Amino acid sequence: MASDFWLIVGLGNPGKKYEDTRHNMGFMTADLLAERWSVHFADHKGLAMLGKGAMNLDGRTIKFFLAKPLTYMNDSGNAVASISAYYQIDPDHIVVIHDDMDLEFGRIKVKSGGSAGGHNGIKSIDRSLGTPKYARVRMGVGHAKRGPNAHDNTVNWVLGGFGPDQRKQLPDFLADGADAAEDIIFKGLAKTQEKFNGR
């Protein structure tokens, strides 16, 4: 019997040194959702910080779990699979929020399934769940410089912070990411794609 709970997962890396880095867009958006819906995080088996809440929108109430994996990005799937198995949440009730270098900063795309696009957190979740068929809120962080040392540039980029201009835009961007996660749950994927993907 599948649970009627939804699971929203914000991806990032735990620890002070990763706070406010591009790779932690998912954590930042999860924190905003936690604030919005009064969710308190507690440890889940050492794999994730996990909280439980209820959203009231459009006259409906939907119960959800909100997770921030503690496994480091490349093993995010262990946390997601553990929570979804423990609470019997099917992949079609999972929303993953993550940074995406293929989109410029401030752009959001919503999708379900498809390729991991080189994102190690998503690759790990695909592997652990055995399917890519869960919803994703892709938060654009722009791209590192190409050319020599491309791999190192990419690592330094995603683990880098935001410039002053981006920092100003960040609160609105995170709010849009949180809205996109809520819209997927309340309005469905297709309507949410119409709203965000064309921007």
Image (spheres, grey):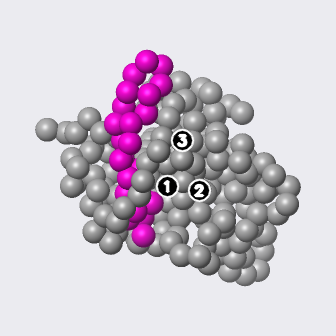
Element class at badge 2: helix
Q: Residue at x 23, y 49 (%)?
A: 87
Three-letter residue code for mark 1: Gly
Extent of the magenta region: 48-70
Instruction: Check residue 67 for magenta coloring.
Output: yes
Which numbered marker is on residue 36?
A: 3
Q: Residue 86 appears at what percent x and percent y?
A: 21, 55
Q: Residue 105 appears at what percent x and percent y?
A: 74, 52
Three-letter residue code for mark 3: Arg
Decide: is 31 above or below 119: above
Q: Which residue is mark 2?
A: 28
The answer to which quarter of the image holds residue 76 is bottom left
Q: Is residue 82 left or right of residue 18?
A: left
Label the magenta part by its dominant secondary structure: strand
Residue 23 vs residue 49, the one in the foreground: 49
Q: Residue 32 appears at what percent x and percent y?
A: 57, 48
Decide: is 129 above or below 60: below
Q: Residue furthest top?
A: 59
Residue 120 vs residue 10, the one in the foreground: 10
The CA span between labels 1 and 3 is 15 Å
Element class at badge 3: helix
The CA span between labels 2 and 1 is 8 Å
Q: Is residue 150 left or right of residue 59?
A: right
Instruction: Check residue 194 for magenta coloring.
Output: no
Q: Residue 150 appears at what percent x and percent y?
A: 71, 75
Dot in front, 2 or 3: 3
Q: Which residue is mark 1?
A: 10
Dot in front, 2 or 1: 2
The answer to which quarter of the image holds residue 172 is top right
